[in-house]
Image: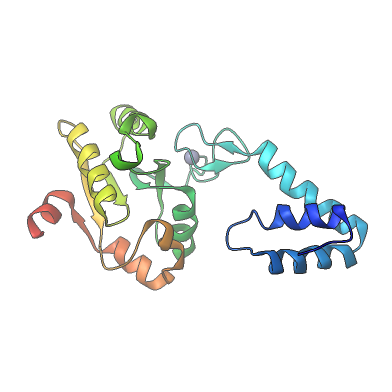
Amino acid sequence: MIFSSKLIEDAVAEFSKLPGIGKKTALRMVLHLLNANVNEVDVFSSTIARMRHEIKFCKSCHNVSDTDECTVCSNPGRNRSQVCVVENFRDIIAIESTQQYSGLYHVLGGLIAPLDGIGPEQLKIDTLVERVKKDEIKELIMAISPNVEGDTTIYYIAKKLKEMPVSITTIARGISFGGELEYADEMTLAKSISKRLPVENYVNVR
Ligand SMILES: [Zn+2]
């Protein structure tokens, strides 16, 4: 693409850094902003910058938050005996959208993947173990991708908590999880949360 303006060229280059955005789409977005009111464009860019600068991570569950404690953890109506363990905060958005889960969450920030050099120490597993030790958690629900990394992570956590009086379950494995969880329809996701299996049973079934 040959531009007559370096300003436009730079803006197109920035948009094309976004996932799934090619040069053509980037140009369309830039043209849209070019035709928009200047104030609207200011709101657009400052909203993105504020999000990046001011975002926090909940001190107990590591969910994204505007304050030190996220809206789930600070809600007195949530069931504190259940914690749903997820890979990232996108999974929380998907599960919350089902409106069928009233417990708390714990965001691991990834899965154990030795081939990619990701070990348990890089994930928020220690803080999960701490929470199980000091809070009144009766059940950990593993809503983790059904793949090698997901299984490795579940077994690692289950082993770490072997001596603790907490039951570990995994949601029904009919649907794709992790990055794909957000695309699962809400009914399917809600069903898979209600139909969960103890981790030991799951091991035996396989
Ligand atoms: Zn939280």
Please state if 28 lies on the left or on the right of 38 as rendered.
left
> Which residue reaches farthest left?
204
**Which residue is more in the foreground, 66 or 14?**
14
Q: Locate residue 195: give its quadrant.
A: bottom left
> Which residue reaches farthest front?
2
Please state if 189 lies on the left or on the right of 75 as rendered.
left
What colouring does the structure picture have? rainbow
Q: Locate residue 52: give its quadrant.
A: top right
Q: Locate residue 61: give its quadrant.
A: top left
Please state if 170 lies on the left or on the right of 116 as rendered.
left
Q: Is residue 99 visible?
A: no
**Which residue is more in the foreground, 8 or 154?**
8
Q: Quadrant of the C terminus?
A: bottom left
Q: How many marks?
A: 0
Please name the residue shown 49% across and 63% down the image. Answer: 97
> Which residue reaches farthest right?
38
Q: Is residue 69 visible?
A: yes
Position of residue 63 measured from the top left corner of the image (x, y, whole percent):
50, 42
Please name the residue shown 73% across and 42% down the image. Answer: 50
Q: Quadrant of the N terminus?
A: bottom right
**Which residue is more in the foreground, 143 or 52?**
52
Please name the residue shown 30% across and 42% down the image. Answer: 115
Please name the residue shown 63% across and 63% down the image. Answer: 21
Q: Reply above or below: 67 against 154.
A: above
Position of residue 104 measured from the top left corner of the image (x, y, whole percent):
41, 45
Please state if 184 lies on the left or on the right of 26 as rendered.
left
Position of residue 36 measured from the top left corner of the image (x, y, whole percent):
88, 65
Q: Reply above or below: 6 against 127.
A: below
Position of residue 103 measured from the top left corner of the image (x, y, whole percent):
39, 49
